Image: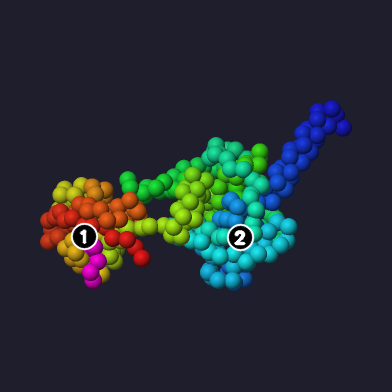
Amino acid sequence: MTNDSSESSNLLSQLSEQLANTVARAAASIVHIDARPRYGASGVVWTDGVVVTADHVVEREDDISVTLADGEAQTATLVGRDPETDLAVLRLPQLGAPAIQKGALPRVGSLSLLVTRPGRSEQASLAAVRSVGDAPRRGRGAQPLPLIAVDVTFHPGYSGGGLVGVEGRLLGIASSGFGRGQGGGVIIGLSRVEQVVDTLVQHGRIRRGYLGVTSQPVEIPAAMRSQVDQARGLLILNVAEASPAERAGILMGDVLVAIAGEPTQGPRDLRAQLTAERVGQAVPVTVLRGGRAQGLTVTIGEQE
């Protein structure tokens, strides 16, 4: 074997050892969660007594079992959940502080490790970061949801695991809830995870605005588009009794085209405008009624 070959082999051995050590350190903060039939899931020790996981893996809210890295099983209680970001928070009173430190958003192309615990033993996948960016447009009032895409197949139980940089810092929480059925998923960036976890720990839920309508996207007839400067809106199929929409005068058959000056061309746009900050606020809305644009004012309610 030549000197060059020996040197390359040594470098690979060192890299392999470094990655294995990184996984071992991170795995001390990765737990197994039993909160649904058939498949378990993973979770990350966040702070003293607090574990973060994916919301969609918590199918029962009682009798939640969490197995720690050392094999000890503890009973957890559900602090709160947020289906919109697919995050849930569990509390384990006897749980100590995490061993893992938190990092920043990674760069595209950087190497990372997805560390999970779908069973009693940890599992790890080496991955390159494929993209980093916010979720598709969610409106001016919405909080950004930074998503990290990695080239890893999300096997059952991977959701709730942690993406870790090669230096050992936590980069985000894994969720297959944004790519179910295709073996795919994403990593939710820590900036949003921290916001959601802090709110759930303090209040037990995420406040969301409520309008009280059932709707579906529709194409706006070409003759009316000049009034609203958009091609799509939301046809109102039903207005709940005593809802903010009913009190504002929104009618079944209206086409909702804007809230607070922001276009509502689909359900995502509508959800993006119903933020916690707008609960109790009177905001202008625009609807198409009888072929003409009409302005109304609605006081946003709070979703129960």
Instruction: Report if residue 299 lies within the magenta region.
Output: no
Disc 1: CA contacts within 10 A as few (<14), some (14-19) or many (>=20): many
Choose mark 2 or mark 1, whichever is in front: 2
Say what secondary structure mark 2 lies in: loop
Snapshot quadrant of residue 60: bottom right
Residue 51 is situated, as x and y percent measured from the top left of the image, at 58, 56
Q: Main secondary structure of the magenta part?
A: loop
Closest to the observer: 263 or 49? 49
Say what secondary structure mark 1 lies in: strand
**Residue that mark 1 sits on:** 255
Name the amino acid, label 2. Pro
Closest to the observer: 290 or 249? 249
Residue 212 is situated, as x and y percent measured from the top left of the image, at 28, 65
The residue at 54%/39% (across/down) is 104
**Residue that mark 2 sits on:** 93
Classify 300 as above or below 6.
Answer: below
Q: Is residue 178 left or right of residue 304?
A: right
The residue at 66%/42% (across/down) is 168
Q: Residue furthest front?
A: 93
Q: Is residue 260 left or right of residue 93?
A: left
Residue 42 is situated, as x and y percent measured from the top left of the image, at 61, 58
The mark found on residue 247 in the picture is: none
Q: Which residues are magenta?
A: 241-245
- The quadrant of the rendering that contains the C terminus is bottom left
